């Protein structure tokens, strides 16, 4: 029970699953490869494995700087290679002169095929180039069925890691004080908006905390949480350093622009 105290109630199923992965490697001395995990899930898994002497952990998402990554849990005596993560990278060929394709278009088309979000990683855009990292076990399905994005017909071709577009992480750290750790208060500070302008984003289900929709302004944000507002960008609450003499919370957060 002590383990769960560090995580939110909605995170407990993943905490339980991660604990089972660890136990599996400990008892069977067999490696365990996960699906693609978002950064919050990666943080949780890191905290559960910790500095374990038997079970070791590595992440890999394909392109350099990937955000979503597969995790490999393995016995301490193994030295895993990148090909053990079983990731295929595809570039999309489409009529760039006639159509505009964005991040959400690709995401929606993949989900529309019935592909679960955890089976593919980052969708990377650079100028008019688009690449996507896919779990190898669904690669043939994707090759056969992923033929259209929005109104554009596409073709896929596999690219090597050397040809993969690197993901550029551009986080800027900001220190400030806030009156509360409520979602609406933090979003107002992080995005330089009034609380009255933040609430419609929350009510409109355009706000996510740790990749899950958060629709309550009073939702309490914890240190380490990732926050996003569709169309505005993303933030991460890096530290909560206690209260100031004026009874305000001293916090620091990272900010970066939305990839879409």
Image (cartoon, rainbow, N blue to C red):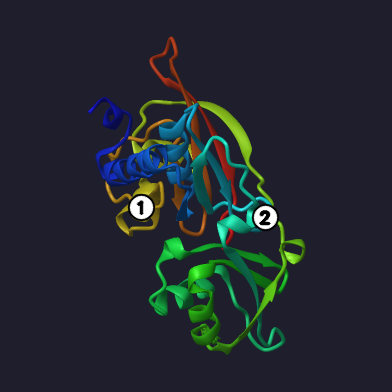
Residue 139 in view = yes
- 213 vs 111, left or right, is left
**Among the 4 quarters of the image, the one containing residue 24:** top left
Can the viewer see residue 191?
A: no
Looking at the picture, does residue 259 appear above or below residue 183? below
* Disc marking residue 107: none
Out of 169 and 234, give the one closest to the viewer. Answer: 169
Q: Secondary structure at mark 2?
A: loop
The picture quadrant where one finds residue 180 is top left
Q: What is the crowding at mark 2: few (fewer than 14 residues within 10 Å), some, or many (at least 20)?
A: some
Furthest residue in direction right, as rendered:
162
Look at mark 2 in the image and give the residue it sits on: 167
Task: Give the CA separation, mark 1 to mark 2.
Answer: 23 Å
Outermost left residue: 1
Residue 25: horizontal and vertical position, in percent? 42, 42
Q: Count of labels shown?
A: 2
In front here: 165 or 25? 25
| Position in image of residue 46 (x %, y %) | 47, 36
Label 1 or label 2, whichever comes before in sequence order: 2
Q: Residue at x 53, y 74 (%)?
A: 139
**Is residue 167 positioned above or below 112 on the image?**
above
Give the numbered dot on residue 212.
1
Q: Residue at x 66, y 85 (%)?
A: 94
Look at 41% across and 46% down and name the residue there: 210
Q: Is residue 260 left or right of residue 43?
A: right
Q: Residues within 10 Å of mark 1 (few under 14, many from 20)?
A: few
Residue 116 image offset from top left, x and y in percent: 40, 67
């Amino acid at each position: 029970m002590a383990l769960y105290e560090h995580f939110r109630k909605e995170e407990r199923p993943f905490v339980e699953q991660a604990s089972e992965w660890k136990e599996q490697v400990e008892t069977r001395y067999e490696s365990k490869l996960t699906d693609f995990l978002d950064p919050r899930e990666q943080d949780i898994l890191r905290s559960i494995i910790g500095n374990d002497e038997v079970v070791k952990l590595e992440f890999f998402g394909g392109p350099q700087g990937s955000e979503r990554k597969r995790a490999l849990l393995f016995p301490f005596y193994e030295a895993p290679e990148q090909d053990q993560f079983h990731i295929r990278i595809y570039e999309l060929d489409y009529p760039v002169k006639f159509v505009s394709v964005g991040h959400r278009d690709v995401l929606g088309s993949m989900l529309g095929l019935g592909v679960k979000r955890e089976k593919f990683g980052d969708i990377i855009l650079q100028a008019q180039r688009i690449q996507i990292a896919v779990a190898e076990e669904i690669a043939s399905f994707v090759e056969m069925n992923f033929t259209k994005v929005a109104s554009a017909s596409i073709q896929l071709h596999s690219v090597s890691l050397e040809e993969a577009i690197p993901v550029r992480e551009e986080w800027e750290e900001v220190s400030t004080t806030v009156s509360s750790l409520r979602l609406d208060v933090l979003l107002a500070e992080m995005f330089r908006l009034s609380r009255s302008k933040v609430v419609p984003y929350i009510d409109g289900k355009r706000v996510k905390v740790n990749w899950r929709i958060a629709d309550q302004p009073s939702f309490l944000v914890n240190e380490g949480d990732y926050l996003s507002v569709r169309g505005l960008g993303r933030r991460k609450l890096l530290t909560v350093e206690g209260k100031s003499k004026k009874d305000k919370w001293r916090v620091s957060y990272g900010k970066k622009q939305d990839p879409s």
